[in-house]
Amino acid sequence: MTRSKNFGVTADVGTSQLTIHLLDLENQNLLAQCVLRNPQSPFGLDVVSRVKHAVASENNARNLSELVRGGVLRGVQSAGQDAGVALGDIQSMVVVGNTVMHHLFYDLPVDDLLKPPYEIKTANALDKHTGDLGISLSDRAMCYSPPLIGSFVGCDAIAVVLASGLMSSTETTVVADVGTNTEIMIGHKGNLLITSAASGPAFEGMSLDCGMPADEGAISAVQIDTTSYRPRVDIIGRGRPMGICGTGAVAALSALLDSSLLNSEGSLARHIESTWLSGRGDVVHYILVQATDSGTGRPIFISQIDVRMMQQSKGAIFAAIELLVDNASISASAVERFLLTGAFGSDLNISDAIKIGLFPQFQNARVDQILGGASSGADMILLNPELRDAASDIARNTVYVDLMDNSEFEFRFSKAQLFPGSQ
C-alpha cells in the first residue's frame, strides 16, 4: 500500500466517456487514471437525447443519475486498485462536465434545457459530501464542482480555461475542446468569450457505421491512391483493424476529397467503378478494409450516411468558431495561438481537419494540442483549492455567446457543411 493517506480524485464526466484521475495530494502527482464509457450511453449518444429520456419520468432521471455516479465510482475503484490506494484514504473530489452531465450527476432537473430560454437549475459552484452522492470515500470527503457558465457551457470549460492558461496569456488565443459537445473559447486582451456547439458523437467514432473509440484496432489515418483508389490505413496497435475512430474518419474524408471520390457537396462518387466503392442498396460506401482483412470478418467502410453526419458535425464546429471570432471583433489572421484538446482534438491531424473545413485557417497561429484539458484543469483545482476563487472569477467575467435559436449561427452552419471549394 502507498504510505501517504492523503489522496484525491477528479472526474471529467463527458457525454461519451468518464475520465478518472487519482492523485497524491501531498506529493502532488498523478498516481492512476481510468477511462471508461459513460454508462448512460444506451439512452442516447448526445446530451439532447439524455435530457429527453430524463424528463420522460422521474425514474428515468434517477436512473441516469445513478448510472453516471456508479460509473464514476467504478472508475475510482479501478484507479485505487491500480495505485494500491484504499477508498477511505481519498479525502477530496473534483467533478467537471458539461451542463447536462453536471445536472444529471448531481440529480438536478434538466427539464428547462429542452425549451427556450434554456435555463439551468443552478449555475453556482457545488460542494457536496461524497457519501450523499453514493460515492463512499473518506468520511470527510467532499465533492466540488466549479460554477457553470451558460445553458450548454459547463464547468468543464472552466477547467479547460485554467489548464490552457487562457486568462493569463497575452496572446490572442482560440481554444477548441472537441467532443460530443464542443466548447470554443477566445481569449483576447484580457477578455474571454465562450460558446458551445452541439457537434454530436460522429468525431468520437461512436455513431459511424463502423465507428469505435480510439482503442486498439481503430483506423487512425487513411491515404488513398488516386489512380487505383486503393486505401492505405494506419491502425492503433498491432492487431487487425476493427473499425474507425474520429481521427481516422477525418483523415478518410480528407483522402476522399484528394482522390475526387468525394465532391464539395459531400456526395461519394457513384460514377466511378472500383472494388473499393460499393453501392449497397441506395447507399454508397467507400471500403477502407475488405472483410477478409478485418478483425471482425466484416468490411470496414465510410458510408454516404457517415459523410452526411460528419458534415453536420464539422459544420457546427466551424460555424461556432467563425461566429465567436466575429463576436470578439478580431480577424482570423489576428489569432496567435490555436489550442485543441479533448480525446479527439488532442490527436487530430490539423492539415486534414482544415482540408475538410472542420476548423478555419488561422494562418498566423501556433497550433498546440493537449490531451484532456478538462481533466488537467480539474487536477489543478484539486491540488490548489485557491483556484476555486479563480474559477468563480472566470464564470463571472466570461461573455457567453448562445447558439441556440441564433439565426446568424444557423446561416453560417448551413454554409459550413459544404467542403472547402464550394463555400
Image: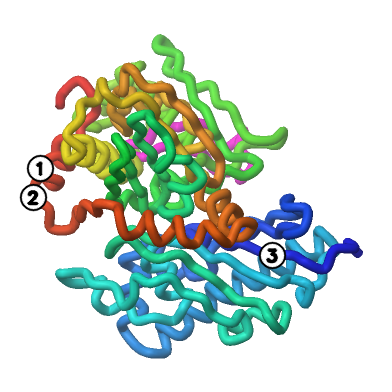
Helix, strand or loop at disc 1?
A: helix
In the image, what residue occupies the spot 44% across and 58% down? 391
* Residue 2 placement (x, y as % from top left): 88, 61
Q: Which residue is mark 2?
A: 407
Residue 282 in sight: no
Helix, strand or loop at disc 3?
A: strand
Mark 1 is surrounded, within 10 Å at the Cα level, by few (under 14), some (14 to 19) or many (20 or more) other residues, namely few
Please tell me whether residue 177 belongs to the stretch shown in magenta.
no
Q: Are marks 2 and 1 in contact (CB under 8 Å)?
A: yes
Residue placed most toward the observer, 293 or 23 = 23
* Residue 211 placement (x, y as % from top left): 48, 46
Q: Which residue is mark 3?
A: 8
Which quarter of the picture shows residue 128? bottom right
Q: Which residue is mark 1?
A: 411
Residue placed most toward the observer, 265 or 168 = 168
In the image, what residue occupies the spot 38% across and 39% down? 175
Q: Quadrant of the N terminus?
A: bottom right
Residue 144 in sight: yes
Left or right, 365 with reference to 217: left
- In space, the residues marked 3 and 2 are separated at their CA atoms by 44 Å
For marks 3 and 2, give the one nearer the viewer.
3
* Residue 295 placement (x, y as % from top left): 64, 41
* Residue 165 placement (x, y as % from top left): 47, 40
User: Magenta residues, as a range?
Assistant: 284-303
Q: Are marks 3 and 2 in contact (CB under 8 Å)?
A: no
Amino acid bearing label 3: Gly
